[in-house]
Image: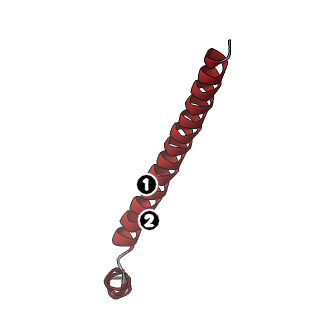
């Protein structure tokens, strides 16, 4: 990580800074999407587990 900071400091090129900003923005966007997807997966897994537990408990009872 430190090497990247040094490179950014050494190269004062606006174009490179723009590219870095764009890539960081894209990374954050991807992370947000991944977080949303992960949350959906977790919620669906929990719901499925609860439904299956409920189903099995109701099935067992006469």
State whether residue 3 is above or below residue 39.
below
Q: Quadrant of residue 58?
A: top right
Colouring convention used in this rendered image of the protein: secondary structure
Query: In the rendering, at what x and y percent does residue 37 appear?
Result: 50, 41
**Quadrant position of the C terminus in the picture:** top right
Q: For numbered disc 2, what is the local secondary structure?
A: helix
State whether residue 17 is above or below residue 6.
above
Near-viewer residue (43 or 55): 55
Query: In the rendering, at what x and y percent does residue 27 appear?
Result: 43, 57
Q: For numbered disc 1, what is the local secondary structure?
A: helix
Q: Which residue is mark 2?
A: 21
Near-viewer residue (7 or 62): 62
Query: In the rendering, at what x and y percent does residue 32 appear?
Result: 52, 50
State whether residue 15 is above or below residue 46.
below
Identified at 47% across, 47% down, the residue is 34
Query: In the rendering, at what x and y percent does residue 47 appear?
Result: 61, 31
**22 left or right, relative to 11:** right
Circles 1 and 2 in contact, beta carbons < 8 Å: no
Identified at 62% across, 31% down, the residue is 50
State whether residue 29 is above or below residue 42.
below
Near-viewer residue (7 or 50): 50
N-terminal-most mark, 1 or 2: 2
Identified at 36% across, 80% down, the residue is 1
Q: Which residue is mark 1?
A: 26
Furthest toward the top, the residue is: 62
Identified at 57% across, 32% down, the residue is 49
The residue carrying pointer 1 sits among few (fewer than 14), some (14 to 19) or many (20 or more) residues within 10 Å by Cα, namely few
Mark-to-mark CA distance, 1 and 2: 9 Å
Which disc is residue 34 wearing? none
Closer to the camera: disc 1 or disc 2? 1
Q: How many marks?
A: 2
């Amino acid at each position: 990580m430190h090497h990247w900071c040094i490179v950014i400091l050494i190269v004062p090129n606006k174009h490179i800074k723009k590219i870095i900003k764009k890539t960081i923005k894209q990374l954050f966007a991807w992370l947000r999407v991944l977080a949303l997807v992960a949350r959906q997966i977790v919620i669906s897994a929990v719901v499925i587990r609860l439904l299956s537990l409920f189903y099995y408990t109701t099935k067992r009872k006469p």
